[in-house]
Image: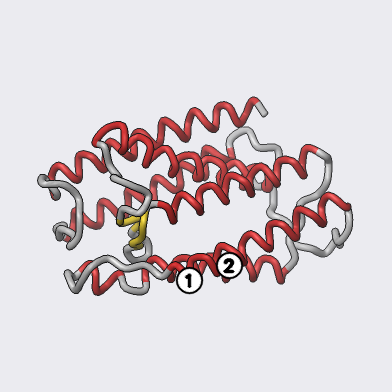
Amino acid sequence: MRRYVWLTLFAVAMGYLEAAVVVYLRMLYYPRGFGFPLAVMPGHVAGIEVAREAATILMLYAAGRLGAASGWQGFAGFMFVFGVWDIFYYVWLKVLVAWPASLATWDILFLIPVPWIGPVWAPIVVSLSLVVAALAVEYTLARHRAVRVSALECTGIALAGVIMIASFSLDSKRIVTGGGAPSFHPGLFWLGEAVALSVLVRGFLRSRSGAGRPSAAPEIPAGG
């Protein structure tokens, strides 16, 4: 578990770095405080910001893979780093600029492939779920059991992701263009969360019993 100490330190530091960048952006585009409607960035600046977010995800994935003995352990590391990073991003914003006012405060969460908008509590719920999933994978591996995911479970996870992204982004075009107050679809979000957690619990219980591990089941490759 020493690896997770370093992953935690990295994620907390990355959370600070992300928060600092956002503080600078808000000083430029929201001098009176962040809120909706959103300020319009010049096209080239928006492109830089999208690329920065993509680079951040790549850095988190690379950090999670470092020192991993297998592909699944690397993926667990990525989920853990992502979850801790996102939680501490909001912790550092609260420390630096006393924002958000509450977990119900609206935020623009992500920009890829379209802007995601929602209350602060929603990405924190996702991040906590990722941390739990990462620890479940590590628990399974530590007991020398293979982590295998059926095609049906892969489909369920993908479907859960699509549903949750939709909950954040269905109204993003209207909101970004100044067409109204921010909105979010909590019913879709909780549906996606329920699907994801049900797949996680099903796989974890099966791995503990040692059942349902056919050799043909897909597994994430170890990679380089």
User: Circle 1 is placed at which residue position?
Assistant: 187
Query: Callout 1: 10 Å neighbours few (<14), some, many (20+)?
Result: few
Q: Secondary structure at mark 1?
A: helix
Residue assigned mark 2 = 158
Q: Quadrant of residue 86?
A: top left
Distance from the alpha carbon under mark 2 to that under mark 1? 18 Å
Look at 70% across and 37% down and name the residue there: 69
In this rendering, position of residue 1 left or right of residue 145: left
Q: Is residue 71 above or below residue 93?
A: below
Q: Residue furthest left?
A: 32
Q: Quadrant of the C terminus?
A: top right
**Image position, residue 125 (x, y; %):** 50, 52
Quadrant of the image occupied by residue 111 = bottom left
Reply above or below: 142 against 127.
above
Q: Nearer the viewer, residue 7 or 65?
A: 7
**Residue drawn where x is 17% and y is 69% of the image:** 178
Among numbered discs 2 and 1, the one appearing first in the sequence: 2
